[in-house]
Image: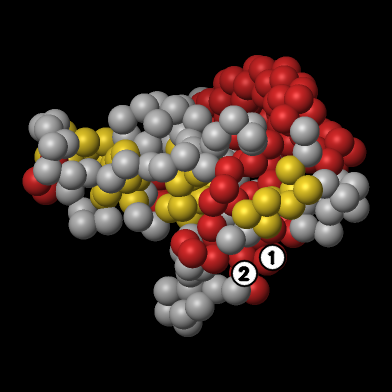
Amino acid sequence: LPQQQKIANILDAADAVRQNDKALIAKYDELTQALFLDMFGDPVSNPKGWEKVELKKLLKNVSKIGRDFNVKNIQYVDISSIDNSKFLITSTTNYLLQDRPSRAQQIIENGDVLLATVRPNLKNIAINTVSGFIASTGFYVCRCNDKINNRYLFEVLKSDSVTNYFVGITAGANYPAVKSSDVSKLLISLPPIDLQNQFAERVAVIEEQKAIAQKSLEHSERLFNSLLQKAFKGELV
């Protein structure tokens, strides 16, 4: 029994470290959300009275694969590529161009904001960081013009109020989705671009600290899992 208690104490201590790292990452996310609301208010109710503009008027065109698209392989981003707890593209699938899924059509660039139109309640949203990936037509791809900052738009699209709006206009029981035409018409609160850029700069600092915390979490996860395996093998004494 004393040996069991010793093992339990070691595992509890290792788990406490990783839980603290998780909590710190959550705090950074909360800080970004709080900063957004403080600077801009809720994007749907728009308490600060910003001008509202249709989303399609704030975006550039996104090219699709045509006959002149001449590459051997593509890296495909579908909805499952996004980790919707981190709002990141965490994986891609390699295909020969001729073997790609029929939905692999959109040529995306660094900085594009991807919004999954299927099951919007799941918030499969991310900012792409690599040019040349091919995205599914299940995404509404936002390539911002000079009137809107992509980080600001990203926060707008993943806000609870915008998500709830999309959920309210979804159609289809087995494959619930919001129409791209409806996404295009979404009215976006548009503060001055200088204020949007200021927000993005502050978020960049938060994200730097969050990245450090994420590395710490990865380390603490590996440590906990290693200790757990040793405990199962009777090596943790």
Identified at 38% across, 42% down, the residue is: 62
Q: Residue 180 placed where, x, y %?
A: 47, 62
Q: Residue at x 76, y 25 (%)?
A: 194
The quarter in which the N terminus is drawn is: top right
Find out whether the residues at labels 2 and 1 contact each other: C-beta distance under 8 Å: yes
Which three-letter amino acid code belongs to the residue tagged 1?
Asn
Residue position marked by numbered label 2 in the rendering: 167
Residue at image location 55% in from the left, 60% down from the top: 183
Disc number placed over residue 90 in the picture, else none: none
Residue 155: x, y in percent?
68, 42
Up/down of 151 relative to 67, above or below:
above
Relative placement, left or right, of 73 versus 230 is: left
Amino acid, disc 2: Val
Element under label 2?
helix
Residue 3 locus on image (x, y percent): 68, 31
Q: How many marks?
A: 2
Report the disc number at residue 164: 1
Which residue lies at the image location 60% right of the left edge and 74% below the top edge? 169
Q: Within 10 angstroms of label 1, few (less than 14), some, or many (20 or more) residues?
A: some
Q: For mark 2, does the 10 Å Cα neighbourhood hold few (<14), some (14 to 19), or many (20 or more) residues? A: some
Q: How are the colours assigned in the image?
A: secondary structure
- From the viewer's perspective, is 14 left or right of 63? right
